[in-house]
C-alpha cells in the first residue's frame, strides 16, 4: 500500500533493536485519514469473503479494527490482556509469549461475543513473531468459529511470524512488509 509506505518513510523512526516507531500516526497519535484508507484496503484484500466479526487485541489494534469495521459493517471485539473483575467468568483464552517483553500473558474474550457461526477477520498493527496472532487464533479455535484471515498493517518480514502463520495456512494480508532496516532507513519488500 503506497500511501502507507510513504507515511512510514516520512514519519516512522527506526530505533535500536529493530523497532519501528510509528507513534505519530498509528500507535499513539492516530491519523484517521490514513486509517480510513487502511480500512478500505483491508476490505479490498478480503473482498468476496464472508466476515461476521473483526477480532483484535487491546490496545493498538482497536483503532485500526474499529475504523476498518465500518467498511465491513460488522462488530469489533477486542481481546483483553489484563485480568479483569468485570470480564465474564466464561471466557475463551489464548496464550501469548512476547519475545519483546520476555514474558507470557493471556488474551481473553467473553464467550458471549464469539460464537460457532462467526467468520472472523483478525486485525492487528504489527506482525513480528506472530505470537499475538496465534493467541487470537487460539480464541477463535476454542469458540469453534472460523478464521477467514488476518489483516496486518506492518509486517516485519525479517522476523518469523509471517512464515509461521502462512505455513499453517492462514490468509495473511500485510499492507506493508519491511524487508530490513538499513542505516536507520526502512527497506520494504513491498
Ligand atoms: P508478536 O506479537 O508478533 O509475537 O511480536 P512481539 O511479541 O515481538 O511484539 C510485542 C509487541 O510489540 C506487540 O504489541 C507488537 O505489535 C509490538 N511490536 C513488535 N515489533 C514492533 C515494532 O517494530 N514497532 C512497534 N511500534 N511495535 C512493535 P503489543 O504488546 O501487543 O502491544 P499493544 O501496542 O497492542 O498494546
Ligand atoms: Na499490537
Ligand atoms: Na503494538
Image: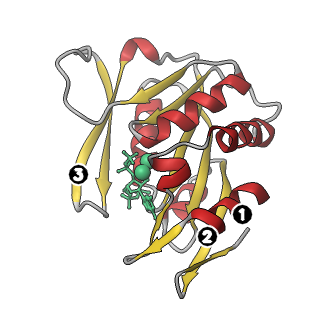
Above/below status of 145 relative to 135: above
Q: Residue at label 2?
A: 178
Q: SS class of the residue under badge 1?
A: helix
Callout 2 touching callout 1 (CB < 8 Å): no
Q: Residue at label 3?
A: 104
In this image, 71 relative to 148: left or right? right
Q: CA distance from mark 3 to mark 2?
A: 26 Å
* Dot 2 alpha-carbon crowd within 10 angstroms: few under 14, some 14 to 19, many 20 or more: some
Could you tell me which residue is drawn at 46 percent across and 56 percent down?
A: 130
In the rendered image, residue 163, in percent from the top left (x then y), is placed at 57, 65
Could you tell me which residue is drawn at 41 percent across and 32 percent down?
A: 139
Q: Residue at label 1?
A: 6
Mark before the other along the chain sequence, 3 or 1: 1
Could you tell me which residue is drawn at 40 percent across and 11 percent down?
A: 112
Above/below status of 29 relative to 11: above
What kind of colouring is applied to the model shown? Answer: secondary structure
In the rendered image, residue 144, in percent from the top left (x then y), is placed at 49, 25
* Quadrant position of the C terminus in the picture: bottom right
Amino acid at each position: 500500500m503506497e500511501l502507507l509506505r510513504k507515511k512510514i518513510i516520512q514519519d516512522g523512526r527506526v530505533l535500536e533493536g529493530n523497532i519501528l516507531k510509528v507513534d505519530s500516526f498509528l500507535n499513539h497519535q492516530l491519523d484517521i485519514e490514513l486509517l480510513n484508507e487502511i480500512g478500505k484496503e483491508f476490505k479490498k484484500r478480503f473482498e468476496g469473503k464472508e466476515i461476521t466479526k473483526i477480532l483484535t487485541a487491546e490496545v493498538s489494534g482497536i483503532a485500526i479494527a474499529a475504523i476498518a469495521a465500518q467498511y465491513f459493517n460488522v462488530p469489533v471485539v477486542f481481546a483483553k490482556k489484563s485480568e479483569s473483575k468485570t470480564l465474564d467468568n466464561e471466557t475463551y483464552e489464548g496464550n501469548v509469549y512476547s519475545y519483546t517483553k520476555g514474558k507470557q500473558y493471556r488474551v481473553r474474550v467473553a464467550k458471549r461475543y464469539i460464537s460457532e457461526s462467526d467468520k472472523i477477520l483478525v486485525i492487528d498493527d504489527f506482525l513480528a513473531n506472530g505470537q499475538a496472532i496465534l493467541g487470537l487464533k487460539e480464541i477463535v479455535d476454542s469458540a469453534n468459529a472460523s478464521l477467514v484471515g488476518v489483516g496486518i498493517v506492518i509486517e516485519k518480514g525479517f522476523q518469523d511470524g509471517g512464515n509461521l502463520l502462512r505455513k499453517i495456512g492462514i490468509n495473511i494480508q500485510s499492507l506493508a512488509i519491511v524487508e530490513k532496516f538499513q542505516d536507520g532507513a526502512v527497506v520494504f519488500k513491498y
